[in-house]
Image (tube, coloured by chain):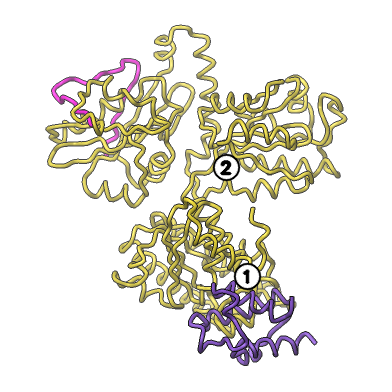
């Protein structure tokens, strides 16, 4: 995207422009704690963040001031009020002998050092968390820095690599135990530029800057992309074309044996791209086809071409017809119940891409190169599917949607909706959010747009705070005879002197249309009653996307008490609605 | 563009000062932003823009724009 920027002066010029421009960028306070001179990174992080629409206000702590900055509540670090804190402590700065003379250390010395490193990280990270709600990005250790260009006994080399690898796993598990704390894999950044380009001995020895300007650019890019993927939700669906996209040739003309997907060139290039697409499937991304073809021609490939790795079972939707692709994509979005903004479109044909960009500007259209060998790189580098944490539900999601499609089919058959619904055997579990459920709850809070009464976004730290304050934070989990939809609803009810206010009430779209929202609200009413509530209020904050909820409270017996700000009140002496075909379990913990 | 033009351009970009304010006499004494970090940034940028290698000893001798020019001209001979 900004490949025209190559040199430090390019970046300096661009950085100056960003600071002067009045473009509407989201402000982010960034603080950098490191064992080296990190200030050199400022223009690189700044420029790369701007392409994700962030304006970084950066603070660089003097090097090796980890404890000084994080143990003092009034340090410059915390005065900067950081949204993001980046921590990078390099192994060679902590233990210069360890990496240079690894084999001179005994096993017990190595264990002691590892223990010290981890406990140091633990105290630093915990201190940050106590003093700030900021997102933490911990850059880990890289074994490839310490590869020397000599032939050494391979066991020695493996032991050193393994030691660093185990340190990284410990850091990762430590970070996972702290809310909103992530690790950035240093070795991936180095491998983008290659080790020879990464190091610059002169800069390290003269100025304690451990990397060359190539390394500075690569690190700036990785940090910006990481921040982008933490702050934004990943796309949910890849819509792709067939001819000359996942195979070489045109099925309608070349036939099953004329198209190329194979283990030799050029078929292998397309087969590899199919693997890249299937990796997204493994990640829980929906795959869908939008192709201008006769459906039977395309199905023949999926069913009968042994080298075609993508099969019908991987596809959540197929629009194979002669409709224009904008129409096809809209149909896919409707079928999967997702917004256009969560769709990424990949098509080798530039005119199809431009049509989609024009008619559906929310869809992310990949700028596909003519060289098919670059397809995988372009898709991977887009960053649209970057995920920094995978929840159990993500892994099951593609299965869940297929169950949804089965449900739709049943709906077609049983004309009478009430017969259909009672035949579903819907079960609803409502429980208090705990450690086991908080990450999915936070994910829903931050990505649910449509059935969301207030669209309040909260971080994990904030949600934990609510729980600590005694507010009610509930999740809703549903299942029916077709399967488990997982955690698909969240509510937060705040208490002020026994006047309870529903601060957030949201449901994932995939469970709508079954009155599940009604039983969720009824549960909330009975829970606040049991807590001695004297009043229950709800609020509706209209957005461009949540119109579906505009009369929700009104339809459930709430009376408007403040029209200006849409606050409604429920008379707690009335008995809430019950839906006889839904079985409710309250999980008490 | 002469070598000195490139040097001036790089300095003005990195220091965020007008190119006309940079002369042979420019030095850390009369340009406030010319601190040790800027000095390092300048070395990196000059190496890239002019495709040369500067040693730490060169860097330490580059005490003014004029000295930078002389050292680099010598390198590029």
The answer to which image quadrant residue A272 occupies is top right
Q: Is residue A144 in sight in this rendering? A: no
* Residue of label 1: A8
**Which residue is painted at 33% across and 67% down in the image?**
A79
Q: Is residue A351 left or right of residue A335?
A: right
Q: Is A330 drawn above or below residue A84 in the view shown?
A: above
Secondary structure state at the residue bearing disc 1: helix
Q: Disc 2 or 1, which lies upstream in sequence?
A: 1
Look at the image and give the residue range highlighted in magenta.
A567-589
* Residue of label 2: A283
Magenta stretch contains residue A463: no
Task: Characterize the local packing of mark 2: few (<14), some (14-19) or many (20 or more) Cα atoms within 10 angstroms.
Answer: some
Q: Quadrant of the C terminus of chain A?
A: top left
Residue A134 pos. (x, y %):
38, 58
**Which residue is painted at 49% across and 23% down in the image?**
A482
Secondary structure state at the residue bearing disc 2: loop
Pick whichever, A44 or A491, lies toward us: A44
Q: Which chain is purple?
A: B
Pick whichever, A410 or B7, lies toward us: B7
Residue A43 pos. (x, y %):
54, 66
Q: Is residue A328 left or right of residue A178?
A: right
Q: Which chain is yellow?
A: A
Q: Is A95 drawn above or below residue A256 in the view shown?
A: below
Residue B23 pos. (x, y %):
61, 84
Mark 2 and mark 1 on one chain: yes
Kindly identify which chain the residue marked by label 1 belongs to.
A
Task: Characterize the local packing of mark 1: few (<14), some (14-19) or many (20 or more) Cα atoms within 10 angstroms.
Answer: many
Q: Is residue A126 in sight in this rendering? A: yes
Pick whichever, A443 or A360, lies toward us: A360
Mark 2 or 1: the one toward you: 1
Determine whether label 2 and label 1 are within 8 Å by CB: no
């Amino acid at each position: 995207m900004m490949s025209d920027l190559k040199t430090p002066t390019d970046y300096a010029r661009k950085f100056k422009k960003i600071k002067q421009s009045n473009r509407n960028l989201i402000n982010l306070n960034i603080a950098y704690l490191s064992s080296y001179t990190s200030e050199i990174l400022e223009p690189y992080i700044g420029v790369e963040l701007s392409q994700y629409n962030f304006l970084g206000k950066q603070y660089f702590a003097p090097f090796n001031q980890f404890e000084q900055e994080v143990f003092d509540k009034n340090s410059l670090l915390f005065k900067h009020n950081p949204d993001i804190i980046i921590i990078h402590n390099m192994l060679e700065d902590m233990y210069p002998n360890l990496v240079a003379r690894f084999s001179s250390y005994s096993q017990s010395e190595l264990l002691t050092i590892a223990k010290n490193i981890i406990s140091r990280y633990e105290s630093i990270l915990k201190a940050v968390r106590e003093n700030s709600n900021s997102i933490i990005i911990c850059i880990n250790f890289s074994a490839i820095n310490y590869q020397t260009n000599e032939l050494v006994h391979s066991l020695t080399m493996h032991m050193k690599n393994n030691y660093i690898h185990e340190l990284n796993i410990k850091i990762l598990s430590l970070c996972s135990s702290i809310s909103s704390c992530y690790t950035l894999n240093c070795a991936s950044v180095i491998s983008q530029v290659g080790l020879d380009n990464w190091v610059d001995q002169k800069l390290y020895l003269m100025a304690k800057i451990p990397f060359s300007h190539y390394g500075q650019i690569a690190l700036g890019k990785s940090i910006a992309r990481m921040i982008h993927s933490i702050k934004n939700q990943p796309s949910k669906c890849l819509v792709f074309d067939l001819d000359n996209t996942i195979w070489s040739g045109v099925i309608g003309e070349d036939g099953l044996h004329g198209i190329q997907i194979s283990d030799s060139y050029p078929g292998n290039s397309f087969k590899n791209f199919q693997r890249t697409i299937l990796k997204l499937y493994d990640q829980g991304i929906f795959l869908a086809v939008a192709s201008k073809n006769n459906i039977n021609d395309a199905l023949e490939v999926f069913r009968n071409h042994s080298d075609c790795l993508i099969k019908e079972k991987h596809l959540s939707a197929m629009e194979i017809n002669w409709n224009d692709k904008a129409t096809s994509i809209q149909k896919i979005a409707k079928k999967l119940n997702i917004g256009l903004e969560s769709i990424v479109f990949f098509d080798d044909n530039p005119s199809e891409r431009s049509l989609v960009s024009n008619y559906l500007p929310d869809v992310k259209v990949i700028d596909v190169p003519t060289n098919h060998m670059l397809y995988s790189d372009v898709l991977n580098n887009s960053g649209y599917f970057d995920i920094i944490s995978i929840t159990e539900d993500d892994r099951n999601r593609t299965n869940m949607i297929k169950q949804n499609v089965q449900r739709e089919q049943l709906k077609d058959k049983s004309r009478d909706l009430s017969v259909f619904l009672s035949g579903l055997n819907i079960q609803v579990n409502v429980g208090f959010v705990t450690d086991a459920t908080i990450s999915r709850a936070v994910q829903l809070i931050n990505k649910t747009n449509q059935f969301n009464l207030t669209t309040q976004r909260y971080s994990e730290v904030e949600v934990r705070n609510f729980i600590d304050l005694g507010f009610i934070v509930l999740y809703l989990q549903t299942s029916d005879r077709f399967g488990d939809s997982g955690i698909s609803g969240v509510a937060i009810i705040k208490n002020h002197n026994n006047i309870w206010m529903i601060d957030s009430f949201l449901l994932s779209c995939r469970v709508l249309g079954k009155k599940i929202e009604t039983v969720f609200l009824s549960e909330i009413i009975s829970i606040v009653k049991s807590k001695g509530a004297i009043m229950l209020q709800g609020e509706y904050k209209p957005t461009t996307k949540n119109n579906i909820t505009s009369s929700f409270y009104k339809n459930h017996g709430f009376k408007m008490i403040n029209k200006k700000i849409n606050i409604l009140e429920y008379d707690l002496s009335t008995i809430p609605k019950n839906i006889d075909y839904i079985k409710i379990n309250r999980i008490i913990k | 563009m002469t070598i000195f033009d490139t040097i001036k351009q790089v300095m003005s970009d990195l220091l965020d000062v007008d190119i006309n304010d940079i002369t042979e006499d420019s030095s850390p004494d009369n340009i406030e932003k010319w601190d040790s970090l800027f000095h390092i940034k300048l070395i990196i940028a000059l190496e890239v823009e002019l495709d040369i290698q500067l040693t730490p000893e060169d860097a330490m001798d580059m005490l003014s724009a004029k000295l930078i020019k002389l050292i680099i001209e010598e390198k590029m001979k």
